[in-house]
Image (cartoon, rainbow, N blue to C red):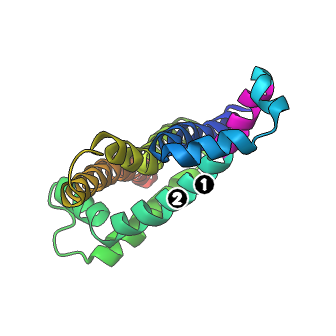
């Protein structure tokens, strides 16, 4: 098995384990008791089968967490935080450039580096992208954790905590995207210097 395959499985499994556990903790006792009651006795009595069922359920849950997190954070980041973060930290080189153009440049930069053939830079960009994926996939488990941790507070305070959590994750994710963009730009500058006679 390649490391990329392992990363993909971990990317799905880790948020799934956290989300499944937190979701189960948040279930009312009556529903949790019913779930235990309807599970076959063979599964309840065999720890290996129980662990296998939990991991399979967690993996499937993780796949949904990844999809939802990508849908939410990628779209939100694209609408403002990513291009604003890139513009803010680009040392003035992108002042006046439209957010849409910054997003397009971000995508082109990544594609250019991934097709460059420079394995050292490709590995660095992939490492940073993996870091971004891990940050992104923490969205659902983070929200569930906030819901569990604030269960004794009013709904409005819980909502504020959830929005704060999503905002913090969005800023962190946008910064990680900036670091990816920055690495791609360094590679492109290096390529341009090598072309100049």
The quadrant of the picture occupied by the N terminus is: top right
Q: Residues within 10 Å of mark 2 (few under 14, many from 20)?
A: some
User: In the rendered view, does 2 fall on the left or right side of 166?
Assistant: right
* Element carrying mark 1: loop
Pointer 1 and pointer 2: residues touching (CB < 8 Å)? yes
Q: Is residue 46 above or below residue 24?
A: above
User: In the rendered view, does 172 fall on the left or right side of 128?
Assistant: left
Residue 117 at x, y percent in the picture: 61, 46
Q: Is residue 86 above or below residue 29?
A: below
Q: Residue at x 36, y 43 (%)?
A: 148
Q: Is residue 125 above or below residue 67?
A: above
* Element carrying mark 2: helix
Question: Which is the main secondary structure of the residues drawn in magenta?
Answer: helix
Does the image show residue 117? yes
Residue 71 at x, y percent in the picture: 49, 65
Residue 145 at x, y percent in the picture: 37, 42
Q: Residue at x 25, y 50 (%)?
A: 168
Q: Nearer the viewer, residue 185 or 18?
A: 18
Q: Which residue is mark 2?
A: 112
Q: Nearer the viewer, residue 172 or 117?
A: 172
Q: Which residue is mark 1?
A: 115
Task: Give the spatial CA distance, label 1 vs label 2.
Answer: 5 Å
Q: Residue at x 30, y 40 (%)?
A: 149
Q: Residues within 10 Å of mark 1 (few under 14, many from 20)?
A: few
Q: Nearer the viewer, residue 12 or 179?
A: 12
Q: Which residues are magenta?
A: 49-59
Residue 65 at x, y percent in the picture: 54, 53
Q: Residue at x 35, y 67 (%)?
A: 76
Q: Is residue 196 above or below residue 3?
A: below
């Amino acid at each position: 098995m390649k490391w990329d395959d392992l990363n993909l499985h971990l990317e799905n499994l880790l948020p799934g384990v956290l989300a499944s556990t937190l979701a189960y903790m948040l279930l009312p006792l009556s529903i949790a008791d019913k779930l235990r009651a309807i599970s076959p006795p063979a599964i309840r009595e065999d720890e290996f089968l129980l662990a296998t069922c939990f991991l399979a359920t967690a993996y499937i849950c993780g796949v949904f967490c990844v999809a939802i997190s990508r849908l939410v954070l990628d779209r939100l980041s694209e609408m403002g935080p990513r291009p604003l973060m890139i513009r803010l930290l680009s040392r003035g080189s992108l002042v006046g450039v439209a957010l849409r153009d910054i997003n397009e440049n971000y995508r082109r930069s990544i594609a250019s580096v991934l097709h460059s053939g420079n394995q050292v830079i490709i590995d660095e960009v992939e490492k940073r992208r993996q870091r971004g994926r891990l940050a992104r996939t923490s969205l659902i488990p983070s929200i569930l954790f906030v819901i569990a941790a604030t269960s004794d507070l009013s709904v409005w305070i819980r909502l504020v905590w959830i929005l704060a959590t999503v905002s913090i994750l969005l800023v962190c994710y946008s910064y990680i995207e900036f670091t990816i963009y920055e690495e791609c730009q360094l590679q492109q500058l290096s390529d341009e210097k090598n072309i100049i006679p």
